[in-house]
Image: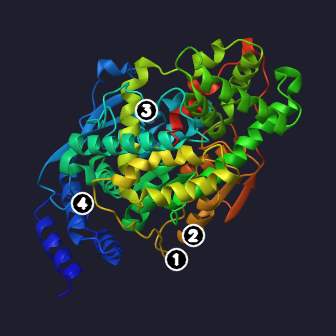
Amino acid sequence: MRATTRYATAGAMLLAALPAAPVAAAPAAAAAEARQGAGAAETIGTMIAAARARARGIAFGDCPEREMLPASLRCGTFTVPLDYARPLGPQTELAVSRRAATGDAPEHQGALVYHPGGPGAASITFPLLGEWAAWRKTARAYDLVGYAPRGVAPSPALSCRPPGEAAETPNASPEHPSPAEKRARIARARTYADGCLRAAGPALRHYSSLDGARDLEVLRAALGEERLTFMGTDQGAYVGALYATLFPSHVRRMVFDSPPDVRRLGYRSGPARARALESRFEDFLSWIARHDAVYGLGTTPGAVRSRYDRMRDEVARKPAGGTVGPGRLQAAFLGAVAYDDYWAVRAAALSAYAQGDPEPLIAQASPRPYTAKGDENADAVRTAVGCNDGRWPADWRVWDRDHTELARSAPFAAWAEAWATLPCASWPGPRHRPLDVRTGRGGLPPVLILAAERDGVTPYAGAVELRRRLRGSALVTERGAGSHGIGGGENTCVNGHLETYLLTGRVPGTDTGCAPHREPNPVSLHRAVPRGDDGPEHLLRGRAAF
């Protein structure tokens, strides 16, 4: 008897004694994992965990006071195994939130679960979007559900170093690292990887997108949903794509917003992202140049970049406020490359610095002690999931050669990519082989993919590839735009397709385009406010990983 058949038979016999066991997806899930060399034990373990979760449900109640959430939001937990091959072994509780549908009973379509990606972000506040106009109709039909994936607070949080410990020295060069800086980075990356192992122990290998997809199946069951309605952004979209591959019969509707390229996970993702970030940085510089009357930084992208380079060199010699060196400067501007609603405030800070006033830059780029714990938690999960999801070379010479070459064409982000992922070179966990994401024709209900054509964080090619692999899916493209995560944002055309799909299940043509949303208005220093800090679109965004 083949191993897959043996596990499936044993699992079916065991689950016969459990209430409402979701066995329909077992053959597809077991076959999908078996094709990749994965053990069918994890599939059976997922079935057992889902059956237990369905029997227990989720006891929603008041949210913890420390979360400072409104009464309209209800909170609870559901339980998942740390290791799905040992479903009755050690468990962990994941936090979940829900805002009940506001419409009448005939309008109700169940729960809509959102995963913000990152990795390292939680969607506990996602249900609050139901109060915003762009989501009001959807909120009438759905209970909006957010959760904190494994390792992410307020679920039991992973941390690999003391919060607030400096990740870099203020004068470290992000574009032209010296040999001494490279040696320091290598040592720091090894220390960080070792810290992750000390913190998580044997469970470290189970911080992965594949385990996230299994957790999603348990959440579906705990919510009492026969089939899943889901939206995911960035790595959250990848988790959803894995779910669709493993459990296609449990999919009702799925939205994949700004998905990564499933062909280029792990080390292979870096070069494409660095080049896309470089192109998007050029878009930002061009926008500043078009508004030279406001910022006075130059009338060409080259002139603006020269001004940026001078500022970088100056803070390398003397960090602004003693804390903002070139590394923190670059981190602040990477945010603007990811989301154009930061363009005005970052351009204003650059303009003020050029005129002798460093205070706006210090305010925007300095470390914030009150976010240190959350920042470290997000970094730890991003590192663990990223290292576990793909393959990474262990030889520093490979990293040095490749990123030195990459920096010639994409200097802005090439080394930032290297430093963000370098712990994976000495990662203490196993080197996973990614699951092959794909479905056959008729194997999956119609699903919707959203992407911006010039997204620097998850390059557009990833959305095109996912549409090809998920047969029957439809892709909506925001042409000429580059903000990361576009569903529920500023583009009414994109939002219209999203709302129609969630409410009716209808998808547009296979490839549908929307005109770009309006570019940010240039504003003076005194009026520059980063709308994204508290705007509704940021409830949908995970931490962009660089």
The answer to which of 88 and 17 lies nearer the viewer is 88
Disc 4 marks a residue whose amino acid type is Thr
Say which label, 3 or 2, has the lower sequence index.
Answer: 3
Distance between mark 3 and mark 4 Cα atoms: 37 Å
Which colour scheme appears in the figure?
Answer: rainbow
Residue drawn where x is 25% and y is 37% of the image:
77
Disc 1 marks a residue whose amino acid type is Arg
Residue 61 shows in this picture: yes
Q: Position of residue 66 (x, y in %)?
A: 32, 19
Distance between mark 1 and mark 3 Cα atoms: 47 Å
Say which label, 2 or 1, has the lower sequence index.
Answer: 1
Q: Is mark 2 on a helix, strand or loop?
A: loop
Count neighbours of disc 3 (C-alpha within 10 A) and say few if under 14, some if 14 to 19, many if 20 or more. some
- Nearer the camera: disc 4 or disc 2: 4
Residue 10 falls in image quadrant: bottom left
- Classify 354 as above or below 198: above
Name the residue that disc number 1 marks.
Answer: 441
Q: Residue 167 carries which label?
A: 3
The answer to which of 275 and 135 lies nearer the viewer is 275
Name the residue that disc number 4 marks.
Answer: 46
- Nearer the camera: disc 1 or disc 3: 3
Count neighbours of disc 1 (C-alpha within 10 A) and say few if under 14, some if 14 to 19, many if 20 or more. few
Does residue 180 appear to the left or right of 463 in the view shown? left
- Classify 328 as above or below 247: above
Name the residue that disc number 2 marks.
Answer: 472
Distance between mark 2 and mark 1 Cα atoms: 7 Å
Residue 473 falls in image quadrant: bottom right
Disc 2 marks a residue whose amino acid type is Gly
Say which label, 1 or 3, has the lower sequence index.
Answer: 3
Q: Position of residue 82 (x, y in %)?
A: 21, 50
